Amino acid sequence: MLKGRNLIEPMDLSVEELDEIFDLAEEIIKKPSEYSNICAGNLLATLFFEPSTRTRFSFEAAMLKLGGKVIGFSEPTSSSIAKGESIADTVRTVSCYADIIVMRHPKEGAPRIGAMVSEVPIINAGDGGHQHPTQTLTDLLTIRALKGGFSNLTIGLCGDLKFGRTVHSLMKALSRYENITFILISPKELVIPDYVRKEVLNKNGVKYEEVRKIEEVIHKLDILYMTRVQKERFFNEEDYVRLKDHYILDNEKMSLAREDMIVMHPLPRVNEIAVEVDNDPRAVYFKQAKYGMYVRMALIIKLLGLR
């Protein structure tokens, strides 16, 4: 039973609990009208201390489509944080009003602090370069829906593997399934952190290789997961400018890939996927964004104990 639980990182959920959420999400996709009023009388609070479009809108759309209501803020200057209020006090106060809280914060660990004092379930919507569990649920539902499952897949992760929290969370979640191979494609400055290599890949005996060029490996992939180089994670503007266009997926590179490969991206995209690729049926990143709304609908229902 997931009622009353917090979701701070993907590993908070067992494989069985993930399946429960995905089964419900797929049911909502098939029969949306049956769930259009299930959250009536419930209030979702969105506490977004850094910018977001997809994550915030998808949570708000999810709650509204379930018949619930939404309150919140999209930047800290519009909250009492600007007056010096602590994260704990903000969360403690908001949990007096709302039935469930979604929180994004630039500091790693902030949602966990919130969860320690909240009277209602807290969902981490991203904390710095650390975790982004609902993006992981989005990615997993997309893979399950389009690839039929999670085992026996070769997944290319391309771009910012150092700061990319979506990549770290996805690797951690997929490491629990059988015969997964990761091909890590990044410049040497943006390789995966040592702790991910040790705690996720080596510890779980996951097969992986590291390369510098997409063209060398794209023909091997079941999934190519592209990421943007995140300006907000860099301390040095020169490093960002030098690396931001290091990888650009275009039709020429796509011609080297298998017909059944899919291209995923957590969005927003900047330059790393050429617009010409959008018309390729293997490009599923906008479909992926829609799956994100459905999986968040299922998660809200589960944490509120309504199914």
Image (spheres, rainbow, N blue to C red):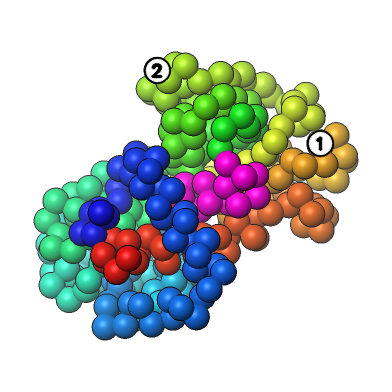
Residue neighbourhood size for the residue with mark 1, other residues' Cα within 10 Å, grouped as few (<14), some (14–19), many (≥20) = many
Q: Quick check: 255 left or right of 69?
A: right
Name the residue that disc number 1 marks: 257
Residue 203, label in figure = 2
Which element type, helix, strand or loop, lies under badge 2?
loop
Percent coordinates x, y for residue 88 in the rendering: 14, 57
Residue drawn at (27%, 78%) of the image: 42
Residue drawn at (28%, 61%) of the image: 303
Asked if one can make out residue 56 in the rendered structure from this viewpoint, the answer is no
**Residue 140 magenta:** yes
Towards the viewer: 16 or 272: 16
Residue drawn at (17%, 76%) of the image: 97
- Considering only vertical position in the picture, is 296 above or below 17? below
Amino acid tagged 2: Lys
Whichever of callouts 2 and 1 sits on the residue coming sooner in the sequence is 2
Residue drawn at (37%, 69%) of the image: 74
Towards the viewer: 77 or 145: 145
- Considering only vertical position in the picture, is 251 above or below 36? above
Q: Quadrant of residue 214?
A: top right
Q: Give the range drawn in magenta.
A: 133-149
Amino acid tagged 1: Ala
